Amino acid sequence: MNKKEYNKIFGIGLNRTGTTSLSVALNILGINTRHYCSITSKTKSTEINDIYALDGAVDSTFKHTYPLLDKTFPLSKFILTIRDKEQWGVSVSSFNIHEHIEYDTYIKQVTCYFEGKNNLLMLSICDGEGWEKLCPFLGINIPDIPFPNINKRKNNKHSI
């Protein structure tokens, strides 16, 4: 890892946008990251005390708290995982997830909040983006292993 120039790393993508793959990737890079997935985790969400002990956290509930995290942990980096809106809708429906947020509205809110700052990366893991975009953003060398692709269905390349 190169010189660390950030405080924490937060994955703020919605469910079914590659958040599990992001969490695994961050851990591969040596970034102590915990993934709180509202679908599979027994823990409802990340507690603030947990965050102090971690280098990174990925949590769909951050969709409500990313501005507070930005203020509480200055110099942190944020990664917004995205995917094709229609494929996202299909994936969310297939898992009986009831997102109480409109996809386009959320993306717009996040990008407007971080406009003019250099601490947001939009990453489309479902479309094949990975190390080549993530590592330069974090100032970390690209590892010599494939980017993790967790929860990918065999018959649908967009099902992360």
Image: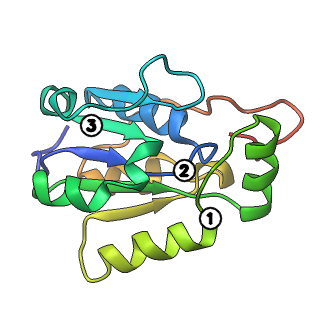
Label 3 and label 1: CA atoms lie apart by 24 Å
Q: Is residue 16 left or right of residue 77?
A: right
Residue denoted by label 1: 103
Q: Residue at x 77, y 54 (%)?
A: 89
Q: Nearer the viewer, residue 151 or 138?
A: 151
Which residue type does callout 1 highlight?
Tyr
Q: Residue at x 82, y 49 (%)?
A: 90
Instruction: Please tell me which of labels 3 and 1 falls first in the chain.
Output: 3
Q: Is residue 64 left or right of residue 4?
A: right
Q: Give how far across and how far down residue 158 sits, in percent.
A: 76, 47
Q: Is residue 122 visible?
A: yes
Residue denoted by label 2: 14
Which residue type does callout 3 highlight?
Gly
Residue with the most extreme top position: 42
The disc label shown at residue 56, or none: 3
Q: Give how far across and how far down residue 148 sits, in percent.
A: 55, 31
Label 3 and label 2: CA atoms lie apart by 16 Å
Contact check, label 1 and label 2, Cβ < 8 Å: yes
The answer to whether 155 is drawn above or below residue 5 in the figure is: above
**By what rule are the colours in the image chosen?**
rainbow
Q: Residue at x 56, y 53 (%)?
A: 129
The answer to whether 29 is drawn above or below residue 13 in the figure is: above
| Number of numbered discs overlaid on the protein picture | 3
Q: Nearer the viewer, residue 154 or 147?
A: 154
Helix, strand or loop for disc 2:
loop
Q: Quadrant of the C terminus?
A: top right
Q: Is residue 157 visible?
A: no
